[in-house]
Image: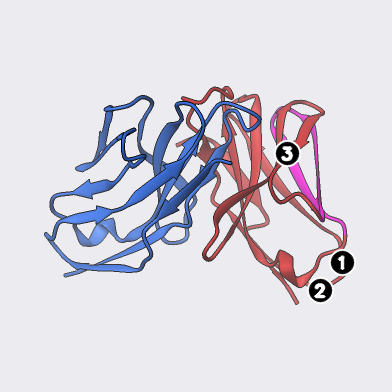
Chain colours: A red, B blue
Amino acid sequence: DAGITQSPRHKVTETGTPVTLRCHQTENHRYMYWYRQDPGHGLRLIHYSYGVKDTDKGEVSDGYSVSRSKTEDFLLTLESATSSQTSVYFCAISESEGVYNEQFFGPGTRLTVL
Amino acid sequence: GNSVTQMEGPVTLSEEAFLTINCTYTATGYPSLFWYVQYPGEGLQLLLKATKADDKGSNKGFEATYRKETTSFHLEKGSVQVSDSAVYFCALSALGSNTGKLIFGQGTTLQVKP
């Protein structure tokens, strides 16, 4: 199994509070991704990173920011959480960005915003 | 834009029944196609993939054939087991502004009863 961990695994927070989710990998893969999973939508890309300090927006980036200061860590921040951000968040990694390339997923973080 | 459509779930089958989960896609060019599986409480893992027309991906008794003429990548298994109960996601990766990034279908839940 690819070495990907996410923390925390579960979090309950209140509307308006900041929240940071962490993804940590031990595979030294260059590319990292944050997705959210919601019923009826599958997984949707929030942000991705193609190297240290190199990030870009995905399909549903509003209300989220990311940072990557080290190869192994990719942080997702909700500056002011809203109930619409209640979801399961998955981190993924890949060696390259080619169309043939497999992504490996972490175990997920279940976030509830009250 | 690129998109993936999966059949609605949940799908409920008895053990040893034949499984088909339909997946169709819209994409420019020649995408790669993937099936991911998510077991309860876990992240996604790659089940199989195909990178060009008429390719057949296979793994753990599951198969899917890349049909460009019908833009489909249906998942099949001849005899399902209780342990196959999971959520199955069809996904594509295509060239263009979203190079290498996965576009997911909404997921299909499979429940296999003894």
Label 3–label 2 contact, CB within 8 A: no
- What residue sits 15% from the left and 56% below the top? B18
Q: Position of residue B44 (x, y in %)?
A: 47, 48
Q: Secondary structure at mark 3?
A: strand
User: Which residue is tagged 2?
Assistant: A14
User: Which residue is tagged 1?
Assistant: A17
Where B10 falls versus B60 (above or below)?
A: below
| Amino acid beneath label 2 | Glu
Q: Identify the magenta region.
A: A63-79
Of mark 3 and mark 2, the one earlier in the sequence is 2
Q: Secondary structure at mark 1?
A: loop
Q: Measure the alpha-carbon separation of dots 3 and 1.
A: 20 Å
Marks 3, 2 in one chain = yes
Q: Is residue A92 left or right of residue B105?
A: right
Q: Give the residue at the far bottom of this rendering.
A: A114
Magenta span dominant secondary structure? strand
- What residue sits 25% from the left and 35% below the top? B58
Q: Position of residue B27 (x, y in %)?
A: 50, 36
